[in-house]
Image (cartoon, grey):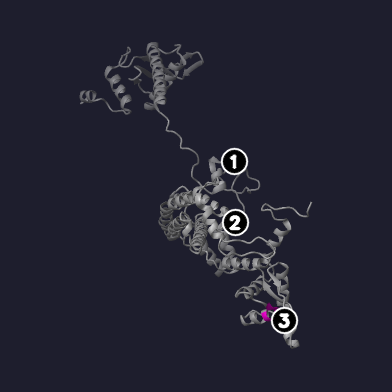
Amino acid sequence: MGEGYFGGDGRLDGELDERRDLFRYVTADNAAEYLAVMDQFTQTLLTDLSAAEVSEALANRGIPLSPEEAEARCASLVRWKNLMPSARDPRVPTVAALRYTRARFQVTRLGGTVHRQVTKVLQMRDGAREVARELLGSMAALLSKILHQAHHPRTIDAEALAADVTTAFTNQSYFADSIRDFYAYLSSVLVRYDLAGEEYASFKGLLLEYVHLIDTDVSRHSPAVLKCLEDLQPVLDQVLSALDSLPGLASAGGAPVERLPGRQHSDWAELLAWYSGSDGGMSGPAQLRAAAESALGQLLTNARRMLTPGGTGGARRSDLMHLASLFAQASVEEAHRGFSAAFGAYPARHVSFGPDEADPRDTASTSWWDAGPVDVPVSLRERGDRTARGRTARVPDPGMDITRLQEEAAQELAARLAAGAELAAAGVLDEAHLTPAARDLLLELVSMALAKEVGLSQAVRVDDVDLNVAVVVSESDTDTVVRSDDGDTAFSRLALTSCASGENRPGDTPEKSTADSYADHVGGDRQPPSAAGGAQ
């Protein structure tokens, strides 16, 4: 069994490690010098330089690098497979020329590819990249021309066919790359919590207008492109045969040659799968629509966050930037005071909640270390959101509660009416036996009488018209004792009699009884109109 293990793409792990070494110079120590050295080897074709020539070229650019340092950098790049030694005739006329001849280097194919990609990434801007949406229309036109030539194999112009095939696949690759970059930019902006104000408004216009424009072009042109690709499948062999008839590149050692796109069945299968989703995944147009819907949903989420009064509020980016500028201009003492004021970095202490405090032992002087924990809602603790979570509770139907309360009130009224009837029938209350309910009603009426006349220089009558009962209270030399099942009640030096409301007991004055009844009914000592007229 051979040494090493195969990776996911069929390559040995050792070969994969060599490919990874191609990127070492980007993050190694002195990365800026390595990048400058690689720039010298990739700025023209077939560049062949010695370490001394690299040192001189970098010195002209203002980058000081001695020949010995340049040779060490080139040696490291050779070890990482970015450069390779150049075979040169060592015969030179002078010793000085030998200095420029020995140890010459040139860039490798993979090293040049990696450096071009690295340079492109380093020079890219953080903003949005326009989508090459106009290429979809040209894709449909190019595929139509290819299909037309495929249906007439005797008159195929192989050169024109090759140009159309290469252009179609190049356009598709560039369009797909621009789409990926654009939606990656959208994703990076939508996740920003500080997106608000004018920036949010401009981004909203970009999303609603430009994304809609892209979706419209894809919806209009992708069906035509898919139709041409499906029609090309039966005659694809004729197209590939015509392309194979053109002169191509052959490797001297028999190594595989990376051909241009569109020269193999797999290239056309991948292109068809991108538009139709025939490989079992989601098609490219469907992915674009799904990404647009997701971006719009995230935009609405941000808008809801900014407009919801119960949420965490708008972005604080401007406030934090202003605070940072104050820290930059403040002295050490002012910075400490400002930090304590801005972030509440005061000594730990417990703030008492007053009567609602769960543990009254936790006071304002209790440290947080000793005080009991405070229950914080999950949404506030994890997301900083004060809005209520979950479904809104249904509004309860008050009908059953109203019926229950009405029944309870009716039962209570019936019990009081029964107590009033019992009390009214008792007459003289000394040594009378009453139920607890009637005894409690007697206590209410006696307390009302005593509140009206503290001295009781004359008998006082209190009527309860609703319960149809009246009680007359007067001074006496003896006590009145009322018996009940739960105990006896003694009224010191008071005589108590009861009757129905409006009924006179022997010894009562009708006018006096009527006046007292009216006063009790209205809550004062005034006489009714008829009584007042008689007094005049």
Tag 3: residue type? Answer: Thr
Mark nearer the viewer, 1 or 3: 3
Residue 482 at what x, y percent from top left?
A: 46, 14
| Residue 51 magenta-highlighted | yes
Percent coordinates x, y for residue 77 in the rendering: 70, 70
Q: Amino acid at mark 1?
A: Pro
Question: Which secondary structure type mostly characterizes the magenta part of the structure?
Answer: helix
Q: Is residue 514 above or below residue 113?
A: above
- Residue at numbered disc 3: 101
Horizontal and vertical percent for residue 264? 57, 55
The segment highlighted magenta reads 49-53
Q: Nearer the viewer, residue 190 or 89?
A: 89
Q: Nearer the viewer, mark 2 or mark 1?
A: 2
Residue depicted at x 73% and y 77%: 103
Are discs 1 and 3 less than 8 Å apart at CB? no
Q: Of residues 117 and 349, which is closer to you in this image?
A: 117
Q: Which residue is mark 2?
A: 346
Q: Earlier in the sequence, mark 3 or mark 2?
A: 3
For image coordinates 70% across by 55% down, the residue present is: 11
Q: Circle 1 sits on which residue?
A: 360
The secondary structure type at the circle numbered 3 is helix
For the residue carrying disc 2, how many other residues have a C-alpha within 10 Å: few (<14), some (14-19), or many (20+)?
few
Q: Closer to us: mark 3 or mark 2?
A: 3
